[in-house]
Image (cartoon, rainbow, N blue to C red):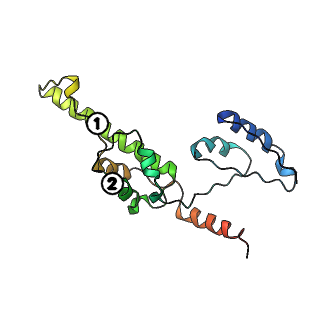
Amino acid sequence: MIVNSIIYQGPELLNKLLIELDGADQRPGIFIIGATNRYANLSLLSFSSHLLSTSLTEAGVSDGRPEALAKGKPIDPSVDLAAIGQMEACKNFSGADLRKLMEEAAMTALKEAKRQRRSNETSGTIMAAQNEPAVNITATHFEQALGKISPSVSEKQIQYYKAWSESFKAT
């Protein structure tokens, strides 16, 4: 068996993958397998004539993904990220979906802080920079964000990939 190993990073990887895929459909027995945690970067490949299939990992939200995505963000200490991740609204969320949820909650918190600052200014309350309210992402911000975010992979797609995966298991 001959295996070619290619190590590239970033946009160079995407370009090299497309070059390598050209003509692969005319060579029997060629399989290209890859994995990424940056699914959004693959959107350019949808314009390609090549068939690419993606799947979700079985990892649940209890595996620390929400905490990892929140690292360095001003999350209010009262927020239970594990509980948010277990909510029905987060069912079938991928890592990218959780990141989008985190970003949307942060934007909601930032917009709220800006509105509060403007309200204080128009009411005549002038606050020194050090006294301005801190931007903290609260459970309410996550709840509002959940109203805007939905899973990027449908239940039908998940069932397809589970069946596809099962077809490769040894009997």
- Label 2, residues with CA under 10 Å away: few <14, some 14-19, many ≥20: some
Q: Quadrant of the C terminus?
A: bottom right
Residue 80's label in the rendered image is 2
Please provide percent x and percent y for residue 86: 40, 61
Q: Is residue 46 left or right of residue 26?
A: left
- Of residue 71 and residue 87, the one placed in the foreground of this image is 71
At mark 2, the secondary structure is loop
In the image, is residue 156 above or below residue 52?
below
The mark lying in front, picked from 2 and 1, is: 2
Q: Tags 2 and 1 in contact by the CB under 8 Å rule?
A: no
- Of residue 66 and residue 115, the one placed in the foreground of this image is 66
Please provide percent x and percent y for residue 36: 62, 47
Name, please, the residue furthest toward the bottom. Answer: 171
Q: Is residue 72 left or right of residue 22?
A: left
In the figure, residue 134 lies in which quadrant?
top left
Mark 2 or mark 1: which comes first in sequence?
2
At mark 1, the secondary structure is loop
Residue type, label 2 = Asp
Residue 94's label in the rendered image is none
Please provide percent x and percent y for residue 142: 34, 49
Q: Is residue 146 left or right of residue 127?
A: right
Residue type, label 1 = Val
Residue pointed to by mark 1: 135
- Label 1, residues with CA under 10 Å away: few <14, some 14-19, many ≥20: some
Please provide percent x and percent y for residue 94: 51, 54
Number of callouts: 2
Mark 2–mark 1 Cα distance, whole angstroms, equals: 17 Å
Q: Quadrant of the N terminus?
A: bottom right
